[in-house]
Image (cartoon, rainbow, N blue to C red):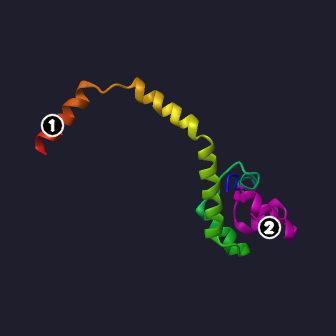
Amino acid sequence: MENPGHPGGFVRRNILEPRNLTVMSAASQLGITRQTLSDFLNETSPLTGELALRIETAFGCRMETLMEMQTRFDIARARKRERQIASELAARIQVQAPTRRTLAIVKRLYAFG
């Protein structure tokens, strides 16, 4: 999937809204702060393993499913930056020439090998 959704949107639409839960009441049930849950639901913070376990325990949605959603979201976001990252790393490699100390260490490794 090219644009997988953040698990926060999934939790909001499929868990909280059908139960008519406010962020405050859901946060209370989960034992977390309103701000922590709000940041997750608004897709500004990632799902943690602990939060996934709390959601599973409180609402029955499997922790593994939620964590897989977060992983797919993270991978897609990184892939969108792939060219930028590749260009940045290529520029670093061209700028940084090996130092004499680095070459000496390499020579020593080969001498013992």
Across and down, in percent, residue 53 comes to 63, 69
Residue that appears at 41% across and 30% down: 93
Q: Is residue 9 above or below residue 105?
A: below
Q: Are marks 2 and 1 in contact (CB under 8 Å)?
A: no
> Is residue 103 found inside the magenta-colored segment of the image?
no
The residue that disc 1 covers is 108
Query: Which of the labelled discs sits on residue 14, or is there none?
Result: 2
Residue that appears at 70% across and 72% down: 61
Nearer-the-camera pick, 84 or 59: 84
Residue that appears at 66% across and 65% down: 66
Span highlighted in magenta in the image? 5-34
Residue 33 visible somewhere in the drawing:
no
The answer to whether residue 13 is left or right of residue 46 is right
> Is residue 6 found inside the magenta-colored segment of the image?
yes
Nearer-the-camera pick, 66 or 44: 66
Disc 2 residue type (three-letter)? Asn
How far separated are the C-alphas under marks 2 and 1?
Answer: 60 Å
Q: Residues within 10 Å of mark 2 (few under 14, many from 20)?
A: few
